[in-house]
Each structure stands twice: as structure tokens, then as C-alpha cells.
Image (cartoon, helix red, strand yellow):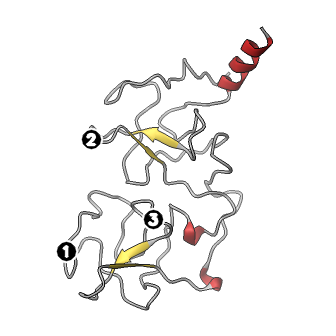
Amino acid sequence: AKWGLRYINEQKDKFLEENYCRNPDGDPRPWCFTTSQSKRWDFCSIPRCGNLCIFCMAYRGTIAVTESGKTCQSWSAQTPHKHNRTPDNYPSLENNYCRNPDNERKPWCYTTDPETRWEFLFVSADEAVVPTEEDDCYEGNGSTYRGVTSETVSGKRCQRWSSQAPHSHQKTPETFPTA
């Protein structure tokens, strides 16, 4: 009986609210089911607390120069490099700023050099930003994350936990209550 009560109490703190990113089952980081028919679930674009923001998934700075000093190609441009990582497919892609739409080790961009398709961004130590406590970030594997991010690393919107469309699942607020 003691194990059963502990299990119930552990399930109560999952907080599967709205369509906010969560980690109810011990995955490496917060995630959600997506509203996309073609992608059932994805990890969320939330930085890990305490990391330099420059290396986090959700970098939103304005650096548009690569490690070797090349200028970044605009995400909406198809020259000199054709690609499918456009603002239409990934809403976080702006202008020609370095971003991390596909879970690389740090932000990157396509370059305007026809001989170099893409490179990681360059950042000096004084340009690096450490997230503050007010920033939306997660610690450890994100099992205690209670922020309001509802977008995946691929730019997809999260499905409500209480919804069974477009993806049916067992991770519901009823299965994992908040109180």
C-alpha cells in the first residue's frame, strides 16, 4: 500500500496543463505531442538553466556571422543554398540570424559563400548570455519544468494534453493529475 500511495503522489506533480511542454515520463528533456499530423511528438525549444544561452536550443540573438567569419544567408532565401528550413516551416527563423532549428550542438546558419553550405555561429565571451531565474529554462531532465513554452525544436505547436487529436495518447491530465 505504501508503494501505491508513493506512485500516486509522484504522478500528481506532472502538471500536464494546456499544451505546455512537460516531461512526465523521464525522457532526456521536456517534450510534447505536436499538432502536426506528420510528427507525433518532439522535444521542446527550452534552454537548460545555467547554460550559456548561445549554446541552448532556443537561442534568439542577432548574431549573423559564422565561426570562420562568413555572413549568414537569410532563412527565407534559396541562394546560394537551397533548403527547407524556412520561416514558414520553422517560425523561430528570422532574417539571417543564427538559430538551431534541428537540434545541432549549437546555433548555425547557411552561409552566403557558395562553397560553404553552413557553419556554426561565432560568439565572443562578452556576447554570451547566461539565462536568469526569470528566463524560461529547465534543470536536469526537465521533470520539474512548469513553464509555458508550447513550441518544439522543429517549430511545431504542442497539442493540448487533454486532447486526443491529432494524436491519441495516454499522457492525459486525468492519468497524471496536478492535485
What secondary structure is marked by label 3? loop
Q: Residues within 10 Å of mark 1 (few under 14, many from 20)?
A: some
x%, y% of residue 82? 20, 72
Q: Which residue is mark 1?
A: 78
Q: Which residue is mark 2?
A: 38
Q: With 138 as the anchor, is 155 left or right in this view?
A: left
What secondary structure is marked by label 2? loop
Q: With 176 as the anchor, is 69 left or right in this view?
A: left
In which quadrant will I find the N terminus? top right
CA gap, disc 1 and disc 2:
24 Å
| Label whose residue precedes the other's in the sequence (1 or 3) | 1
Which of these two is toward me, 1 or 23?
1
CA gap, disc 1 and disc 3:
21 Å
| Label whose residue precedes the other's in the sequence (3 or 2) | 2
Q: Is residue 71 above or below residue 60?
A: below
Q: With 84 as the anchor, is 172 left or right in this view?
A: right
| Label whose residue precedes the other's in the sequence (1 or 2) | 2
As shown in the figure, which amino acid type bears the numbered disc 1?
A: Gln
As shown in the figure, which amino acid type bears the numbered disc 2?
A: Ser
Q: Which residue is mark 3?
A: 104
Dot label at residue 169? none
Residue at image x 50%, y 69%? 106
Q: Is residue 103 above or below residue 119?
A: above
Which of these two is toward me, 5 or 136?
5
Q: Residue furthest right?
A: 2
Which of these two is toward me, 62 or 46?
46
